[in-house]
Image: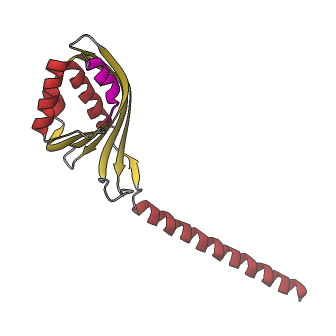
Amino acid sequence: MKKILFCAFACSAFVACSNQQLADEKSTTATTAATETKPQAAEFADAKYADIGKKGLAALSSGDIDAWMNDFADGAKYYWNSGDSLIGKAAIAAYWKNRRTTVIDSISYMNDIWLPVKVNEPQQKVQAPGVWLLGWYQVQAKYKNGKRMGQWIHTDYHFDANDKIDQVIQYIDRAPINAALAK
């Protein structure tokens, strides 16, 4: 009788453990499914955005502002960390065309790093969701006055639903630029 009771107890414990294991697997599956359906707050975006950034720097370097502007939305905004800003594709194009023809003799970019990010859930209310391209690169510029300037620049590009750049935020140090342009 003891043997029968022991076998019954062992079978009950085995079945109970198996049921708990099945419940744990179902819970894990449900949690995984819920996690998979909810997008991450931010994730890597398509590498095509890095290609847009690289192509833009090549166009700026060659002085082809029109080619660079092909990737901009009509209502684009261009901000610098110093507080200056340009609003509209035409204003951005006019500024850079003037800069490349009357101020900058040559400009080159090197050691570039690109990080395309899709922001699904902004961390702050003022941040725009969507695709951002973060770029870091060294710039070397020679000005029409013969002086040179070099520095690292960080630029953030935001893309609209049509994959056009609608916002640029550029972080630069004005001191080396001002020194090179001083008379």
| The C terminus, quarter of image | top left
Residue at 34 percent across and 26 percent down: it is: 175
Residue 69 percent location from the top left of the image: 16, 33
Foreground pick, 118 / 110: 110
- In this rendering, the answer to whether 126 lies above or below 155 is below
- Is the magenta region chiefly helix, strand or loop? helix
Foreground pick, 112 / 83: 83
- In the image, is 114 to the left or to the right of 143? right
- In this rendering, the answer to whether 44 lies above or below 61 is below
> Which residue reaches farthest top?
146
The image shows a total of numbered marks equal to 0
> Which residue reaches farthest right?
2
- In the image, is 38 to the left or to the right of 71? right
Residue 142 percent location from the top left of the image: 27, 15
Residue 122 percent location from the top left of the image: 36, 56
Residue at 29 percent across and 29 percent down: it is: 54
Does the segment drawn in magenta span residue 51? no
Does the segment drawn in magenta span residue 180? yes
> Which residue reaches farthest front?
183
Give the image quarter of residue 58.
top left
| The N terminus, quarter of image | bottom right
Range of residues picked out in magenta: 171-181
Foreground pick, 22 / 2: 22
Q: Is residue 110 visible?
A: no
- In this rendering, the answer to whether 59 lies above or below 122 is above
Q: Is residue 75 visible?
A: yes
Give the image quarter of residue 120.
bottom left
Residue at 40 percent across and 62 percent down: it is: 38
Which colouring convention does the figure follow? Answer: secondary structure
